[in-house]
Image (cartoon, grey):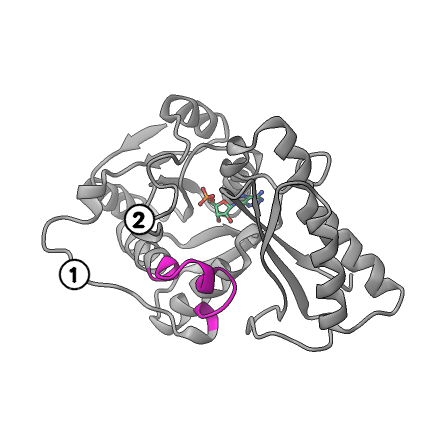
């Protein structure tokens, strides 16, 4: 597996692949790999000839009070895991390589998709995400790029940006990979103290509860939200950031749930660790 640090070198590699007719699949990540990341990489290997993974803890998508400095990192371990997953190139740029002096462009997807959910709790987050993904597409020139449904809103934002800017990259969505007990895998799960790990199950269990209530006939987003809020707060150290029933594509809140509704959740555990999860309710 080749490790590339410089955008220009990355693009040179991409041009070589294109010349020889090789299709490139890109998996953008912030590293500290887990099985969720690896399943995206393996999927990319099935869909493309060459897999490129970007590893970049993008400073512009973190707010001033967020966990940029503390974000877990283990470059050696990530390299070994990516190589074992069949990755051809790991693109791990320095921040200064991505944002050199004078950098002054931001890609903003409109507030219809970015004003709610994580966009409301994390102002500026999706501008950071859209800008870095747009840059990654320009640098790596992939035929396709894979994103996890774990970040449902991110996926919708990237799809919109890719279509609106004619970026010509096929966006592939990959299902959420979970621990055996249901917790959605996340690099941020490492922040959880042992007693908080149990409380983190409140998210996936809330989705299960919503499905049960829906199967019994409940359709009111308001009543479901109230029940889920009580349920999540019955776990120690939990604070609901949002519980929202939205249309799967438009991300607009719905009053009555149907087959196109996604339940999106963000919960803080112990006041610090913010976890997200989502799922269809009527399945
Ligand atoms: P991250 O490194 O957290 O920015 O994630 C990189 C990519 O992996 C994003 O497309 C995420 O949606 C995806 N991802 C993260 N966790 C999971 C998971 N548990 N299941 C599926 N995809 C995931």
167 versus 177 height, above or below: below
Q: Quadrant of residue 72?
A: top left
The residue most toward the left is 102
Q: Main secondary structure of the magenta part?
A: helix
Report the label total: 2
Q: Which residues are magenta?
A: 113-127
Q: Secondary structure at mark 2?
A: helix
Q: Nearer the viewer, mark 2 or mark 1?
A: 1
Instruction: Compare residues 201 and 54 and report the one nearer the observer.
Output: 201
Q: Residues within 10 Å of mark 1 (few under 14, many from 20)?
A: few
Residue 104's label in the rendered image is: 1
Q: Secondary structure at mark 1?
A: loop
Residue on which the image places disc 2:
140
User: How far apart in space, not on screen, are marks 2 and 1 (Cα)?
Assistant: 21 Å
Instruction: Compare residues 226 and 185 and report the one nearer the observer.
Output: 226
18 to the left or right of 72: left
Residue at horizontal 89 percent and vertical 64 percent from the top: 216
206 to the left or right of 75: right
Instruction: Compare residues 171 and 245 and report the one nearer the observer.
Output: 245
117 versus 252 height, above or below: above
> Where residue 147 sits in the image (x, y, percent)?
50, 51
130 versus 65 height, above or below: below
Q: Quadrant of residue 103?
A: bottom left
The residue most toward the right is 216
74 versus 125 height, above or below: above
């Amino acid at each position: 597996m080749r490790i590339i640090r410089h955008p220009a070198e990355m693009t040179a590699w991409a041009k070589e692949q294109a010349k020889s007719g090789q299709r490139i699949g890109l998996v953008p990540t912030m590293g500290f790999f887990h099985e969720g990341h690896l399943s995206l990489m393996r999927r990319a290997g099935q869909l493309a000839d060459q897999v490129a993974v970007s590893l970049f803890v993008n400073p512009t998508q973190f707010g001033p009070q967020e966990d940029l400095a503390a974000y877990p990192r283990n470059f050696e371990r990530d390299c070994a895991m990516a190589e074992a997953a069949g990755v051809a190139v790991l693109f791990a740029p320095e921040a200064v390589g991505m944002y050199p002096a004078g950098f002054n462009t931001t890609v903003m997807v409109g507030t219809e998709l970015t004003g709610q959910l994580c966009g409301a709790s994390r102002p500026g987050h999706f501008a950071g995400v859209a800008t870095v993904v747009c840059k990654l597409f320009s640098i790596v020139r992939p035929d396709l790029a894979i994103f996890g449904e774990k970040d449902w809103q991110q996926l919708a934002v990237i799809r919109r940006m890719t279509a609106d800017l004619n970026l010509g990259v096929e966006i592939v969505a990959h299902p959420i990979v979970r621990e055996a007990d249901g917790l959605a895998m996340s690099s941020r799960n490492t922040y959880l103290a042992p007693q908080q790990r149990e409380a983190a199950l409140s998210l996936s269990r809330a989705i299960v509860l919503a499905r049960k209530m829906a199967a019994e006939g409940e359709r009111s987003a308001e009543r479901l939200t109230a029940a889920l809020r009580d349920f999540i707060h019955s776990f120690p150290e939990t604070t609901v950031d949002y519980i929202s029933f939205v249309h799967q594509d438009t991300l607009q809140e719905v009053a009555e749930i149907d087959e196109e509704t996604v339940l999106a959740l963000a919960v803080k555990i112990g006041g610090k660790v913010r976890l997200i999860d989502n799922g269809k309710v009527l399945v």
